[in-house]
Image (tube, helix red, strand yellow):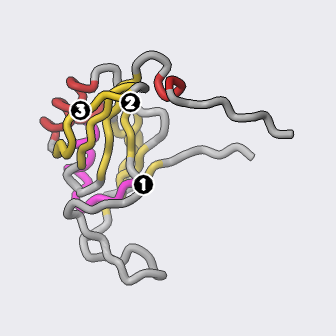
């Protein structure tokens, strides 16, 4: 079964989010969904910005509510770029907060940031063979 990945990001200010993701990463609006959503194109997966008010219920199965202060979640976005320094400057100019300076690894370089809505994101620049520099071969299934 094939599947398609769509990324959805809850935000409390749709126009500010459209501006941020456009300015920071060069994305552009593909379609609008009234005043409650916008499809951002230009990455290899569409990103949907969804207007959700602060304090609104995150789901019927939890007491958690949406909070747009900086928060941690085990799921975040990685933006792969050709020039990590330039991309970090661009993201900061658009409103991102740099949370960890650029560090180098065998596979490339990475900076940790958060967007203006409290969501964590990373900017990566692969070097050499990227993640293949540290990957081990997976045995073929028997």
Q: Is residue 17 left or right of residue 108?
A: left
Q: Is residue 45 left or right of residue 78?
A: right
Q: Nearer the viewer, mark 1 or mark 3?
A: 3
Q: Which residue is mark 2?
A: 80
Q: Which residue is mark 1?
A: 75
Kindly state the secondary structure of the residue where label 3 is placed: strand
| Above or below, 81 relative to 6 | above
What percent of the width, then of the height, locates residue 98?
Answer: 18, 42
Q: Residue furthest top?
A: 128
Instruction: Pick the residue in front: 51 or 96.
Output: 96
Kindly state the secondary structure of the residue where label 1 is placed: loop
Query: Overall secondary structure of the magenta stretch?
Result: helix
The answer to whether residue 12 is magenta is yes
Q: Residues within 10 Å of mark 1 (few under 14, many from 20)?
A: few
What percent of the width, then of the height, locates residue 13?
Answer: 22, 58
| Above or below, 101 relative to 76 | above
Precedes in sequence: disc 1 or disc 3: 1
Residue at 50% from the left image edge and 48% from the top image edge: 6
Give the residues in magenta: 9-23
Task: Note whether residue 113 is visible.
Answer: yes
- Which quadrant does the C terminus fall into? top right
Q: Which residue is mark 3?
A: 102
Q: Residues within 10 Å of mark 3 (few under 14, many from 20)?
A: some
Choose top left, top right, bottom left or bottom right for residue 78. top left
Choose top left, top right, bottom left or bottom right for residue 63. bottom left
Instruction: Pick the residue in front: 14 or 92.
Output: 92
In three-dimensional space, the C-alpha distance between marks 3 and 2, rounded to whole angstroms, equals: 13 Å
């Amino acid at each position: 079964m094939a599947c398609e990945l769509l990324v959805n990001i809850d935000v409390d200010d749709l126009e500010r989010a459209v501006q941020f993701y456009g300015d920071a990463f060069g994305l552009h609006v593909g379609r609008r969904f009234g005043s409650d959503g916008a499809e951002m194109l230009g990455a290899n997966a569409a990103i949907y910005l969804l207007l959700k008010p602060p304090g609104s219920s995150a789901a019927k199965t939890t007491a958690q509510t949406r909070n747009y202060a900086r928060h941690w979640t085990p799921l975040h976005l990685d933006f792969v770029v050709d020039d990590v320094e330039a991309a970090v400057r661009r993201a900061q100019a658009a409103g991102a907060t740099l949370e960890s300076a650029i560090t180098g690894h065998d596979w490339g370089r990475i900076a940790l940031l958060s967007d203006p809505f409290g969501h964590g994101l990373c900017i990566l620049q692969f070097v050499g063979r990227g993640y293949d520099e540290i990957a081990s071969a997976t045995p073929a299934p028997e």
